Structure formats: structure tokens, C-alpha cells
Amino acid sequence: MLKGLALTPPVIGRISIGKVVEKNGKRLPEKDDEFTVTSQVQGKDGWVNHPVDETLRKTEGTKLRTIPVRLLFDDPELNLRANYHLFDRQSGRPLCVGNGETCRRSLAAGVQTLPCPSPEGCDLAKGGFCKPYGRLNVRIGDDDELGSFVFRTTGFNSIRTLSSRLSYFHAVSGGLLSTLPLELRLRGKSTTQSHRAPIYYVDLTVKTGMTMAEAIASAKAESEVRKEAGFDQSALDKAARLGFAAGAFEESEEEGAAVVEEFFPDEGDTWSGDPSVGTTGGAHGANKAKTVLADKLNQKAALMNGAGAAISIQHLARQPHAAGP
């Protein structure tokens, strides 16, 4: 087995509430007011829809705002991984990933574990380079019980809501998250930061038409059926935990490039020579000598003696609501 390679849940599709569109010659992320379930193949017009997307829509043209799902694992933090992420926007390579207390940072000397004060207190995070980034893996249908669809987000509202729901469902079901009949639900809200315009975020609820008691009873029954068949859920959770820990970062450079394009706008591709400028995106910054972000990270890390940038679910729950999905 390859060493240093994170083993992540097999992904057979994506769930998104937005897309990347081309405007004025630039590819920019654009939010939507419905789910889209896509394959992992891109065409000239973006990601190609997965066949399950059409199946989930009751009639053609209907907005998809609920998706029945099951989870892969009983451990909430295996289903949803939420961290602060800093990517190299040129290569898509993860540079710094942390949990609000410690971070793993890629430096010239290799990947190191350093303290993390969160973006608000980190010099490296100035200019919006470091964001919360969450990945939720779910099952849709029963065709592939170990294959998953991944929902990615950088929105506080989605991450906080999903984190809370997973924690609560885990508690009330006696830890039977993997057999609970659940549903992803798109919700809207308005805030002062969104200038009263609606923003959309993702919630996780019990399946439509079921009470909590009915969902828990169903989870217990399904868990017993699995045990009798020899399905070892605790061993699966353990294997996933070891797989995530096998690599320094969950995202590969190839995956990171697509993540950067969709969730991390390109205004911060490089750092300027003047820390007060933040990026080289503007006219003033364009006159500055451009330095690749990875090189700047190494320079700043040396000056900071290891002070880092990086979000545990518990840390995130203490943060104020933001306007993102």
C-alpha cells in the first residue's frame, strides 16, 4: 500500500447547490437555489448530471430541494470533515489544513504540525486566503453501499447546521447514524450580511413522512439485519479513520484544483510583496513583484516561528453565523 496517501470514501458523484460559470472570460462560482447531483465527469458546459439526478426529480423541471440519503459511518466526524483550508490557487495543492488548535502545513522542510489560532488571529489568513471547508459523504439509493456522493461547502451555515444535526442524531439514536433514514434539505434565509437577499444552506433531517421515533426504530431494525448478515460497521468506521489519517491532506492536488475553482475565487492567486496589500489582484498590487503563495508561506512561517492558520466542529459551533450557504 502506498504510504502518505489518504484513503477517502469512494466517490461516485457530487451534490452541489451551485456551479462554475464563465463571465467576461473568467470561470467564477455561482450559487443556485436547488440541488444538482452530478457525475465526476466534466463537459464543455460543466459537470455532467448523474442519472440519479433525473430519478430524484418528481417531474421534469422541478427544483430538487430534498434528497433521501443514508450515511456511511456511525461516527459524525467521519461523515463530515470540517477544517480551515489554505490552498495554492495555482496548483490546487493544499498548503495548510487545521482544526482551530493545530494545523498541518506544507513547508519547504516538509509537512509540519503547528499551532493554529484560526483565521481571525493568523497572519497567513489575511486577505481571505484561508476558509472553512467541509465535505459530507452520503449514500443515495442502494446500488453501491460503500460508494458515496460528496457535498462540498465553504459556508458556515451549512457546516454548522450539518455538524449539529449529526451530533444530535448520533446522540438520540444511540450511535446508529449509518442506518438512520435521513434527508438532505435545502433551506433559505436572509441576513444583514446578505442585504436581505435569500441565501441557501444545507440541512439534514429525518426522511419526509417519518417521525424521529419511527426513524430510530427503523435504524435499530436495519442495524440488526446488518449484524446478522455479518456487516461490521465498527470495523468500517475504524478502517475509514485509519484511511483519513494515512495522508497529510485529504485532497489531492488534482481534486484541489477543482475545489479552488469552485469554492476559492482567484482574487488571491498570489501574495504581493507588501503584506498590507494582501493580493496582487488590483492595479496597485499588479505593480508589485508577484510571489507564489507557497514561497510566501515558507517565508512568513519562519518569521512567525510556527504560528499557523487553520477548524474543529466544536470550534466552529462557537463562531457567529455568516452569510454563506
Image (cartoon, rainbow, N blue to C red):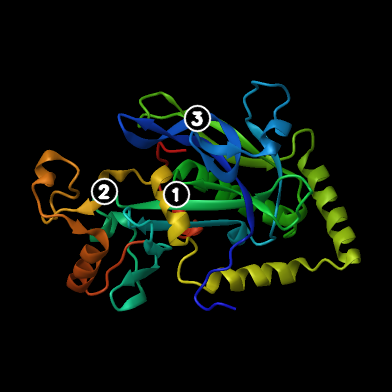
Outermost residue toward the front in this view: 44
Q: Relative to residue 114, is residue 46 drawn left or right?
A: right
Task: Count the marks.
Answer: 3
Residue 315: where, in percent of width, then height?
44, 58
* Lower sequence index among marks 3 and 2: 3
Q: Which mark is residue 268?
A: 2
Near mark 3 (Cα within 10 A), the count class, few <14, some 14-19 or many ≥20, is few
Residue type at mark 2: give it: Gly
Quarter of the picture containing the N terminus is bottom right
Tell me which amino acid carries mark 1: Ala
Disc 2 secondary structure class: helix
Query: Mark 1 or 3 closer to N-term?
Result: 3
* Res 258 label: 1
Which residue bears the numbered disc 3?
Answer: 32
Of tags 1 and 3, which is closer to the observer? 1
Q: Would you place residue 63 above or below residue 114 in this image?
A: above
Q: Looking at the rendering, which quadrant does residue 242 occupy?
A: bottom right
Q: CA distance from mark 1 to mark 3?
A: 18 Å
The Cα atoms of the two marked residues, 3 and 2, are separated by 24 Å
Instruction: Please tell me which of labels 1 and 2 falls first in the chain.
Output: 1
Image location of residue 143, percent across then percent down: 78, 49
Q: Within 10 angstroms of label 2, few (less than 14), some, or many (20 or more) residues?
A: some
The residue depicted at 38 percent of the width and 61 percent of the height is: 93
Depth check, front residue: 70 or 266: 266
Mark 3 residue type: Asp
Identified at 40% across, 63% down, the residue is 97
Residue 136 placement (x, y as % from top left) = 58, 51
Name the one closer to the observer, 145 or 230: 145
